Image: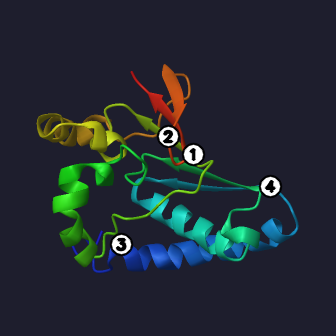
Amino acid sequence: IGPVVGSEKMIDSANGGSLDMYNQVMDDVRAGKNVELVGYSEGTLVAIDAADRIAAESPGGVLPDNVRVTLIATPYAQGGLFDNSFTGGLVGGVLNEMGIPTDRKLPAGTIVKYYDTDVYANGGNMNPATLIKNAIGLGIGNHDIPNENDPHYSFTDSDGVIHVVYSR
């Protein structure tokens, strides 16, 4: 993620990716075929922005019934890293200036999947000590794509987003 790693800012990369995703699925969306937009980690920004583009062209500004959004290990849902008062509030302005947006909202009905120890996806529910501990654990699998066979539970948050939370 530039400027931290690489030369391109995350927002610029995501804009290109979301336009590509949008262009790839719009014929199917218009034809009424079922479409699923999927993103992982920072790539969830691509799927969110593609969904926003589709919704902007749809009646009432909402996603059509044939479009589903699934985000894996996203920091953008309620309880995600950007929902934490420290990272979303105090540091959020700095991250936004660096081209790492912290303010995306998910469409109702979005499915988010993550491990309970994932600092990106569940960091909003962690105190600073747990945030640091789990950030150190990123290299040992705390930010993996969940194994569908691992124990899990689900709930729907106040934005209508469905969380599927896995543990090991």
Q: Specify few, some or many for label 4: CA neighbours under 10 Å numbering under 14, 14-19, or 20 or more.
A: few
Numbered circles on residues, count: 4
Q: Are marks 1 and 4 in contact (CB under 8 Å)?
A: no
Q: Earlier in the sequence, mark 2 or mark 4?
A: 4
Q: Are marks 3 and 4 in contact (CB under 8 Å)?
A: no
Element at label 3:
helix
Residue 22 horizontal/vertical position (percent): 65, 73
Residue 113 higher or lower than 87, as above or below: above
Element at label 1:
loop
Q: Which residue is mark 4?
A: 34
- Which amino acid type is shown beneath numbered disc 4? Asn
Q: Specify few, some or many for label 1: CA neighbours under 10 Å numbering under 14, 14-19, or 20 or more.
A: some
CA distance for labels 1 and 4? 20 Å
Q: Specify few, some or many for label 3: CA neighbours under 10 Å numbering under 14, 14-19, or 20 or more.
A: many
Q: Which residue is mark 2?
A: 157
- Which amino acid type is shown beneath numbered disc 1? Gly
Q: Which residue is mark 1?
A: 160
Q: Earlier in the sequence, mark 1 or mark 3?
A: 3
Q: Earlier in the sequence, mark 3 or mark 4?
A: 3
Q: Earlier in the sequence, mark 3 or mark 2?
A: 3
Which residue appears at 27% of the width and 72% of the height? 96
Image depth: mark 3 or mark 2 in front: 2
Q: Are marks 2 and 4 in contact (CB under 8 Å)?
A: no
Which residue appears at 20% of the width and 43% of the height? 135
CA distance for labels 1 and 3? 27 Å
- Which amino acid type is shown beneath numbered disc 3? Met
